[in-house]
Amino acid sequence: MSGIEAEGVLGGGGEAGNNKAKTGEGDGGDSRSLEGPDPKDTISYSAVRVIGNGSFGVVFQATVGETGETVAIKKVLQDKRFKNRELQIMRTLEHTNVVQLKHCFYSSGEKPDEVYLNLVLEYIPETVYRVSRHHSRLKKHLPMIFTKLYMYQLIRALMYIHSLGICHRDVKPQNLLLNPPTQVLKLCDFGSAKVLVRDEPNISYICSRYYRAPELIFGATDYTAAIDIWSAGCVMAELMLGKPLFPGESFVDQLVQIIKVVGTPSKEEIESMNRNCTEFKSPQIKAQPWSKVFSSRQSPEAVDLVKNLLQYNPKKRLTPVASLAHPFFDELRDPATRLPDGKPLPPLFDLSEEEFKFCGDLASEILPKDVFEKLSAKYGVYKSDS
């Protein structure tokens, strides 16, 4: 496949195989469209290689012919009866730690009436999964500064999407993109994401197995965005251990793996996960001390954060805002902290007005003092004391 033919997302699909693409303007124009060509012009995309595939479709690394820019194109089969939820959600997102949608277009498939939606995304070369696996193969631990950086940026992304009512539902290391020179992390793959509405049921068979929250295993359909927090806790534990914390081999074994570490949930905890699940027979297994789950070289702050993310009761899990204020991240708030190569840290505290207000009283703990005072004055939220 050397060229991709694109047509505006509100139009029909074009003939596959051509190498010219009309830019998609979206609903009333997309402010995040690729800069440069007039919307009436065409853009050609040349696929370089396949960088991912699955039941959803395929992801290509591609080059924009007119600018030479590298992009990622996610190609998914579109059911014409329904709007694409991923596209709808991606159009609302604009954040430092969320992958950016640049364009979208439809293309025809090989079969008659087969239409594909192509999401043109910013290209980011690495993933947390591959970085973590690389260290594991070398039998080395990921330096703690990277665990702090990756988790802070992931939790900040979750704070942002959760503030919009969006639950990602597939947080895992493979969906955390990394730009190695800057260490900027971006959450990607919103193919399972959904705006959760109270009293509207959701499917429970969601999220990749190792990172699946226990309420999903218990069949809950009224779950909250706290399922993403459990997944984030699993990611953090994996970065610390160099391997998955709960490596379940099946749907049922996943719960077994969780119980082996966290212990058998109490009657109250089961009710908090799924109020309809009254019968649960399991041997009473005591929780392992978290200090034994992790080696003694792990800081008490790191262990405490994991423990508070991996609570059975979804309401007892730390919120993203409370997580960002956790002492585990204090090193990132120190102006003297640098990357191991001496470079400055990526942007961590460039909060928008909406983010700043969403942090509420914890903003002063999340941000370094000078940044807090600067943003307080900028957004007029708090009166600065100095």
Image (cartoon, helix red, strand yellow):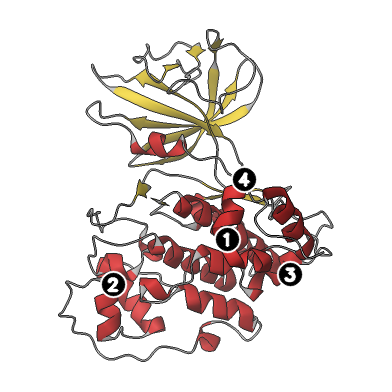
Label 4, label 2: how many angstroms apart (C-alpha)? 32 Å
- 3 or 1: tag closer to the N-terminus: 3
Q: Amino acid at mark 3?
A: Glu
Q: Secondary structure at mark 1?
A: helix
Report which residue position mark 3 lands on. Answer: 331
In this view, the mark in front (1 or 2): 1
Report which residue position mark 1 lands on. Answer: 359
Q: Position of residue 348 (x, y in %)?
A: 68, 55
Asked if marks 3 and 1 touch (Cβ < 8 Å), the reply is no
Q: Nearer the viewer, residue 84 or 243?
A: 84
Residue drawn at (62%, 69%), measured in percent from left and top? Answer: 325
Q: Quadrant of residue 250?
A: bottom left
- 4 or 1: tag closer to the N-terminus: 4
Report which residue position mark 4 lands on. Answer: 96
Q: Secondary structure at mark 2?
A: helix
Report which residue position mark 2 lands on. Answer: 273
Vertical side of 261 occupied by 199: above or below: above
Residue drawn at (32%, 20%), measured in percent from left and top? Answer: 109
Q: Is residue 185 visible?
A: yes
- 4 or 3: tag closer to the N-terminus: 4
| Quadrant that contains the C terminus | bottom right
Q: Position of residue 116 (x, y in %)?
A: 34, 25
Q: Position of residue 249 (x, y in %)?
A: 32, 67
Q: Is residue 142 visible?
A: no
- 3 or 2: tag closer to the N-terminus: 2
Label 1, label 2: how many angstroms apart (C-alpha)? 26 Å
Q: Secondary structure at mark 3?
A: helix
**Mark 4 Cα within 10 Å, few/some/many (few <14, many 20+)?**
some
Vertical side of 273 occupied by 150: above or below: above
Q: Amino acid at mark 2?
A: Met
